[in-house]
Structure formats: C-alpha cells, structure tokens
Image (spheres, rainbow, N blue to C red):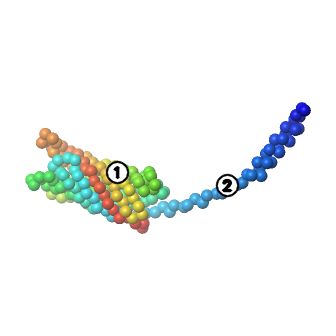
Amino acid sequence: MKITEKMKIAFACTIVMMFANNVQAQETTKVEHYDQGFRLGVGVNGGYSVNDPYKLTLGADARLQYDLSKRYSVTVTTGFNNLFVSKADGSDLGFIPAKAGFKAFIWDDQFYVMGEAGAAFAVTNGYNETSLIVAPSIGYATKYIDISLRYEHYSDFPRVNNNGTLGEGVGQVGVRVAYGFKL
C-alpha cells in the first residue's frame, strides 16, 4: 500500500488533534508588588583596631535605608565612634562618620553584602582632621534586627608603624547590631 501525500497530512492532523485535546493554558502566577520605601536602623558597634596605638572601638549609629527592590537598597549612615588607645600616654580618637552605601541581599533575602564610603570627621582631643572611610561588610537582617561584620579603613587618621614612626591609615574589624523599622 502506497502512502499518498493526502494520507500523510491526514495522519499528521490526527496526531495533532489527539495531543491538542490535552493542551491547557498555563496558570499565570501572581507577581507580588514590593513597596519601595525607607527604613531606619539604630545600632551599636564595637570592634578591634588593627593598627597601633588604638585597640578597641565603640560607637553608635543611625542608618537610613531606601529599598530600591526586595534585594537592593541604598544607605546613608552617621553616628559617633571612638578609637581607644592601647597605652595610657595616648589620646583616644572620636569621630563622626558620614557614609553612603549600597546593600545587596544575596541569599534568602536575609544575608547581604554591603559597601560604604564617606568621610570621618575627628572631633576629640584637638585632632580635627577629616579622613576617607571605606567599609565593606557582610550581614544578616530580618524585619527588625540587623547584624553585620565589617572592616573599616580610615585613610588619614594617624597610626604608629612597627618601627615606632608615625604613619597614616587606621583599620578596624567591627560588629554592628541594630534595630530597624519601616518609616
């Protein structure tokens, strides 16, 4: 039996009709709308300075955050920090940081990485210089709590080098614990 062109077309149409009966439209998923908005966080931070003559650091801050999306935010942070000297013959260094940053949530909308840059205005013990701040951090945030680990580098603050000479550039490793809420 010879299959003609008309039989091939009829066979193909029959198969298509059999499968077309099972085809259904996909259900559309509802996309949640994420409300952009501001958050305010108030925190305390402490750490360890990696350069002499300073050892411990302690401070408090306020961070205003604008959520661009569920995963990305821009931040502005200020407060007061103090670098405590390790010896009795030195002077502590207190300063007001002013930083802007970008926060990106990378896992489960709770773990994030953040980078900040800005200026540190020295306000204690007659030292009145201003320093550049660069501060990368990683953290964990919930609806109200924000805990982060960061490194901050102050490029123009004085330090004591290993050979006893003076240099510039002080770094610290710190932890920040904050309470945050929507405005």
Q: Is residue 62 visible?
A: no
Q: Residue furthest front?
A: 1
Would you place residue 110 above or below residue 156 in this image?
below
Residue 151 position within the rendered picture, expressed as x and y whole percent measured from the top left: 29, 49
Q: Nearer the viewer, residue 183 or 143?
A: 143
The three-letter amino acid code for the residue at tag 1 is Ser
Query: Residue 89, position in %: x, y?
Result: 9, 53
Q: Quadrant of residue 64?
A: bottom left
Q: Residue furthest left?
A: 89
Depth order, front residue of 68/112: 112
Sequence-first disc among 2 and 1? 2
| Residue at 20% over, 54% down | 56
Residue located 54% across and 61% down the image: 33
Q: Position of residue 77 (x, y in %)?
A: 33, 58
The CA distance from mark 2 to mark 1 is 42 Å
Q: Is residue 176 left or right of residue 123?
A: right
- The residue beneath circle 2 is 26
As drawn, 57 above or below 13: below
Task: State which quarter of the image contains the C terminus.
Answer: bottom left
- Of all residues shown, which one is farthest toward the top? 2
Give the residue displayed 77% in from the left and 50% down from the top: 20
Q: Can the viewer see residue 21 in this picture? A: yes
What residue is rendered at 15% in x and 45% in y? 160
Classify residue 6 as left or right of residue 122: right
Q: Amino acid at mark 2?
A: Gln
Q: Secondary structure at mark 1?
A: strand
